[in-house]
Structure formats: structure tokens, C-alpha cells
Image (tube, rainbow, N blue to C red):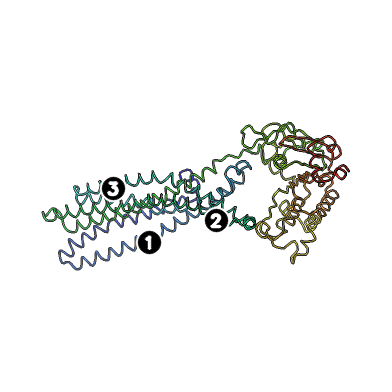
Amino acid sequence: MYKLRRFLKDYKKECIIGPLCKLFEAILELFVPLVMAGIIDNGIRGNDEGYVWRMGFLLVFLAVLGWSSAMFTQYFASKASQGAGTKIRRALFEHIGTLSHAELDKLGTPSLITRITNDTNQVQQSIAMMIRLLTRAPFIIAGSLIMAMTINLRLSLIFFAAAVLIAFILWFIMNQSMPIFSAMQKKLDKIGLLSRENLSGNRVIRAFSKQKTECARVDEATEDLAKTSIKVSRLSALLSPLTYAVTTFAIVLIVWFGAVNVNSGDMKTGEIVALVSYMTQILLAMVVVANLVTLMTRASACAGRINEVFETVPSVTEKTDKPINIDKNAPKIEFEHVSFNYSNDGDEELSDLSFSVPRGATVGIIGGTGSGKSTLINLIPRFYDVSGGCVRVDGRDVRDYPFEQLRGQMGIVPQHSVLFSGTIRENLSWRNKNADDGEIVRALKISQAYDFVMKLPKGIDSYVEQGGRNFSGGQRQRLCIARALVDDPDILILDDSFSALDMATDAALRRALKENTAGTTVIIVTQRSSTIRNADLILAVNDGVLAGCGTHAELFESCAVYRDICLSQQSETEAAV
């Protein structure tokens, strides 16, 4: 929690005035038992009705004043906690945006969602409770002890013994609860992961009639979370009864020994009532502290998870944010003895890749599943950093570029088609928010999406649901290709982006790309040999190694890996043409 204090720097006034108002309320509350003692000893015992009325009005005044002070505290606590929570979420989102793919893979999407939502809510709630109660409860306890000492020093020893015993109980419960709360949040991450998988893969689950199996998985995860929650709840539930038991026993001792003192004439009845009232105030304050300890323990675990995200340093960073000079005479893309490993465990996903791509060339990358095709192209926009060797764009190492200059010249269509809620126009304007209708229509025509988009009631202003679920797989792919084509990128990367297209649309799209992307370096990742057979350069990748590099005719004759792929899809006569 301490590390997150920076998010409260704009709410210093609220964090100071709020506790002071609560402190003022606590001071007023400490005077109430003294007023009650005066009413009993001076008003009732002395038959002074006027004194009783005056003190009664004073009690009402103290109550109204305390209520007003509490309302101010509530306002400042809400303002500070809500504001800090908003800043934490914004900062988390911004920081996550700076992380490379490697860190995102490590943290996991479900866990990050839980940290932005649930964990931040816990921290936000704890801030509000700290402003409202963190100063009041200790002050009430300390103040009640001091006031008890002014009434009877010997009986105040009971107060001190009770306070020490309750403090030990609180420390013990807090020490035992914190690790369990941390485990709870991790199990909540697992439920988030399972929920995400089941909701996004609902059709697959139904297709294989796996509803019962998936329900069992979810039940197992929720049962595990429930057992952990019950364990920590039982532990936390001990706080209130133990605190009540200690305090009630202390009240019994006060009444017992106080009665003895009253009988001997050393104390008055009103003083006994005041002492009991102070003990009751300590009891209520301790109950508040007990609940606050439970909340703070959970919030501390959540804050640790939030700080884990903030402390995660991106492995891919910019050396500068200013544009660098490039060599327009150099090849557009160069790989020089490139190696890459996701986990640094010695088992390389790519090994010693070297090739050069001329400007304006069309490059095909083909290989079996898991051969490293997508990994290879992810190194060009620097989603990951190479483990060895060098990747160059326009003669400069990609690590020298600012992200905006490097990725700004690329149009990328990922393997999984991703559309965002909004209109088609808004989705297609991601590369250039000022793109006019002419640019958007041109991109739609090249991507073979123009016909089905224009048949929609609102054309390019038609609504796209979350994830583009109101479009088919092939339509989503074509819209993603159109988005990459807007604003004429220097490098167009198509990562298996024709997989959902029929052969006729595939051929029409390739023809349109060839006719309308002159000067653009096009990289096509595919498993269809027919898609790239007319490419200027074909890279055959096998188990992270470049098995062959050349044209279709050259590779068909010299590269066994490429030849096997072609023959698995076409007859030898068709493949050799």
C-alpha cells in the first residue's frame, strides 16, 4: 500500500482534512461519557432538573456537531479514494501498454484484468476506510484510556490490559490472513481465465458437447476459491468474538471493582457509568479496527499484485523518441544471423536466420505448424527483441528506431482477426484517423470487402460489435486487411490472413494487392503454397531454421521442405508449373 501513496499526491487536502474531521468527531465522542456522568452525579442525584436539561441539550449539540464532521469526512474520503482508484487504473493501463509481448505473455490477460478491476477496487475501498477510520479508532482507544486514568488510575489498568490483549489478537489474525488473501487473488485469476475461455469458446464447447466437462472445471476452481475464502473468513471471524469477549470481561471487572469503590465512597455512580462507556467505546473501536485489519490485509495483498505490474520492466524499450535517419538505398528488411528464444531456456525458436528483402518485393513465408513463421515476422515491428543477431529496416537496426517511426510505416494483419466495437469507418481509420472515404473505399476494394460492406444498411458507417462477432471469419479477415492498407504502409505484413478465404477470393485479393501496392514491401505468411507461388522471394521455414530461400521454381527443385509442402497440396504437375 505504501508504494501506491503517489496516487494520493493530488488529494493531500482530502487526506489531511478528512482524518482531522474524524478526529474532531472522536474528541466530541470522548466528552459524552463525562457529560453523562455529570447528569447522573449532579443532575439526577442532586435533583437539579435544569442541569439535566442543559446537559441534555449539550449532548444533542455534540451529536449534531459530530454528525456534521462525519459527513465532511465521508465526502473527503470518497473524493480521495475514487480519484486515486481512477489514477491507479489509468496508470496500470498506460503501463501495460508499454510492456512488450513477452511481459504480457508472462502476466496473462485474465490476471491483468483482475488487477485492473478487483484488486484496484480493494485498494480504493481501503483508502476510503483509512481516511475515515484509521485515525479515529486509535484516538478513541488512546483517548478512552487517558480519560479512564483521570477518573480512576487503578481501574484504568484493566483498560491497558484489555488493549494489549486485543492488539495481540489483531496482530495474530493479520499475520495469518495475508498469505491466504494473496492465494485467493491468484485463484480468482484462474476463475477469470476459465470464464474467458468458456465464454469465447462457447461454440466449440457446444460442438463437442463438453458443457458438463467445462462446468466441472469451473466448479473445481470455484470450489477451491470457496475453500480458501472459508478458511480466511473463519480466521477473520475470530476477530469480533475474541474482541467482544476480552472487552466484556473487562467491563465485568470494571463494574465489579467499581461497585466495591462506590460502596466504600471512593467513586461515584456516574464515574462507573463513564468508565463502562469508555470501555464500550474501546470495544466498538476495536471492532472497527478488526474489520479494518481484515480489509487492509486483503488490500495489501491486492496492492502487492498491482505493484508487481508497475515493477515489471518492459524488455523492449526505445532508445529515443525522435526520428532517426535511414538509408533508402539499403534493402527494406534484413535478417543477419538472427536467433530468438521466448524463455531464455536454451531451446531456440529461431536459429541463425539470414536473408534480405528488396524494397517493393513480395515475400512469402511458408512452413509447417509451429515452425516459427509468426515469430519471425514479430521481430520486424519489434514486438520481441532478438536473442542474437540483428534485424534491420532501411539499413538501421530496429532497436535504434522509436516505436512510432518503426511501426508507423507498417500495416499489420495479425493471425487472429481483431476488430473493435464501433463503426467500420472507425476500425479502418486506425492507421490514419483523418482518412477520407476515398482511402477507405480503395482499401475495401483491394481487400475484397467492398461488396459486402456496401450491402450493409449504413455501408462503412455500419456498426461492428465487440470482436466483430456480427461478421463471418472471412469478412473479419478482409476488414483487418483493409485496415492495414489504409494510408499506404511501406511494409504490409499478412500473418496467415487468407486462411478463412475461399480460393476465388484469395486469388482476387492477391491480384489486387499486386496491382495496387507498387512500392510496398508485402510479407505473406501462409500454409498454402498457391498463395505465394508468384512471390518475388519465398522463405521456407522448418523448426526455426531457414530451410530454403528463393523463388517457387528454385525451391521446388532444391528445397525438400518446400517441395513436400507443395506436393501435399497439389499434384506434382500442378506444383511444378
- Secondary structure at numbered mark 3: helix
- Secondary structure at numbered mark 2: helix
**Residue 157, percent across and down?**
22, 46
Amino acid carrying label 2: it is Cys
Q: In which quadrant of the rendered view does residue 557 lie? A: top right
| Earlier-in-chain disc, 2 versus 3 | 3
Amino acid carrying label 3: it is Ala
Q: Is residue 208 left or right of residue 555?
A: left
Q: In which quadrant of the rendered view does residue 576 lie? A: top right
Which quadrant: the C terminus?
Answer: top right
Label 1 to label 2: alpha-carbon separation: 51 Å
Label 2 to label 3: alpha-carbon separation: 49 Å
Residue behind mark 1: 68
| Earlier-in-chain disc, 1 versus 2 | 1
Residue behind mark 2: 215
Q: Is residue 572 left or right of residue 213?
A: right
The 10 Å Cα crowd at callout 2, few under 14, some 14 to 19, many 20 or more, is few
Q: Is residue 462 above or below residue 117?
A: below
Amino acid carrying label 1: it is Ser
**Are the two marked residues, 2 and 3, in contact with CB atoms closer than 8 angstroms?**
no
**Residue 408, percent across and down?**
72, 45
Q: Judge by depth and name the residue closer to the eye, 88 or 223.
A: 223
| Earlier-in-chain disc, 3 versus 1 | 1
**Residue 265, percent across and down?**
11, 55
User: Which of pointers 3 and 1 indicates the residue nearer the eye?
Assistant: 3
Residue behind mark 3: 163
- Secondary structure at numbered mark 1: helix
Q: Judge by depth and name the residue closer to the eye, 572 or 561.
A: 572
